[in-house]
Amino acid sequence: MKKRSLLLTLAALCLYLAPLLAQPVERFVKVLVAPDHTDWTYRTGEKAKFTVSVLQNGNPVKNAVVKYEIGPEKMPATTKETKTLTNGSLILDGGTLKTPGFLRCVAVAEVDGIEYRGLATAGFEPEKIQPTVADPADFDQFWTKAKADLAKVPMDVRMTLLPERSTESVNVYHVSIQNHQPGSRIYGILSMPKKEGKYPALLHVPGAGVRPYFGDIANAEKGIITLQIGIHGVPVTMDAGVYNDLRAAGLDQYWNYNLDDKDRFYYKKVYLGCVRANDFLVSLPQYDGSNLAVTGGSQGGALSIVTAGLDERVKWLGAFYPALSDVTGYLNGRAGGWPHYFTGNNLAFNNKKEKIETAGYYDVVNFAKRVKVPGNYSWGFNDETCPPTSMYASYNVIKAPKELYLALDTGHWTYPEQRDKMNEWLVSRLNAKKQATSVK
């Protein structure tokens, strides 16, 4: 049993710490940047100031030379200067924005020949940011047909018990489910309470990349059926080297595949795969018949919103820093969402009518408009992968009940407190619903 306890601990760590892998490593010298408003938020037209401090061993580094840039996030800087911090700290006039958005200050200090970087981002009435992406006139018809076609394909479920991962109270399975067409499959790790009864279900959708998965055993121990899926049609229990090979070859830049064709775009099978995962969950005899939630971060944050927008069986969603949000922002002079289709080296390749049109059918904004269930969301202003401008473009169009927990200084990573709050929120809703169902 000691071995199983260790596996349970490792599985929980893999699930909850995976989104933290991009968390910045502690460095010997710290460059701290902070706006002069404690909530990092301003009215449009109001001037922001940034304090830049360079610290070593908790003390100011005197006469540190700092290069800094200030400008709208992900856009060319409007100010670039180099200054010496006589006493280790300096207040900069950051300027303002006349329209809702984000202004970022990036500072780089060189100490003993090594460069150290810090940044902070001021928000200007972010709650007023509106999307730029088009909402296709036949958006609902397109996805209604896609789901109808999916429903015609048998699930052909294959479940393999993983006794080495199972615990005294939870059975863990590797599952394979047929997706949107014969031969196309999705794979995942199902964690199922052993005790006889009816349980709510939680679907975990993945961030970008390709990797193995270990399942959410911890929440299954709390009486919730959990399913953690991959999206690429490959088993999720293989050796790490296999995923490294796929990442470097067949699945390299997969988010670009067939962007010029809305019917063949890579994310069509991905979005439908999330619905198919729910088909599987609700088919389980142990499912309580009514309580289903979905959660994930980055690409998984996007898939959480997409799944809730597509599938009325979802009752709750939890999303960290959703990607694929308002990707056309760059074509309108501001930051767009990951994977940044229309900026930098991608612009010449993707700035085509058919690709812009396809993006509208898959942009998170257009699913967010159709979300009807309560959601919990969390991100920070310093995210350079999923710019807050893009995330607010999606969040602001959601009409359903919503809660946003901001960890302002975070980039594309989370504090443990964010993960804990999200999980507590999801579990409390599912368990409350479970109790209400049992009372009936």
Image (tube, grey):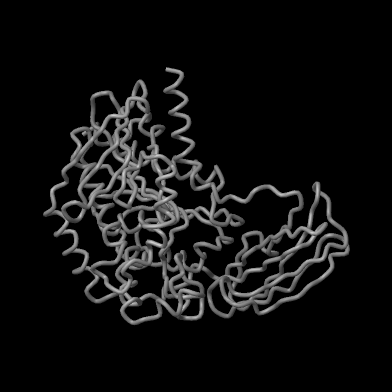
Q: Residue at x 29, y 33 (%)?
A: 173
The quarter of the image holding the N terminus is top left
Q: Is residue 218 above or below residue 124?
A: above
Quarter where residue 201 is shown: top left
Instruction: Return the x and y of residue 200 as percentages of the image width and height.
Output: 28, 37
Q: Is residue 414 left or right of residue 227?
A: right
Q: Residue at x 35, y 56 (%)?
A: 303
Instruction: Return the x and y of residue 83 as percentages of the image width and height.
Output: 81, 71
Quarter where residue 310 is shown: bottom left
Total numbered labels: 0
The one of 427 and 58 positioned closer to us in this rendering: 58
Q: Is residue 282 above or below residue 64?
A: above
Q: Is residue 346 above or below residue 172?
A: below
Q: Is residue 37 left or right of residue 203?
A: right
Q: Residue at x 29, y 66 (%)?
A: 265
Instruction: Return the x and y of residue 117 as percentages of the image width and height.
Output: 70, 60
Q: Residue at x 61, y 69 (%)?
A: 42
Name the residue at the top extreme. Answer: 1
The one of 96 and 228 positioned closer to us in this rendering: 228
Instruction: Return the x and y of residue 369 as percentages of the image width and height.
Output: 33, 66
The one of 220 and 425 positioned closer to us in this rendering: 220
Q: Is residue 81 left or right of residue 136?
A: right
The quarter of the image holding the C terminus is top left
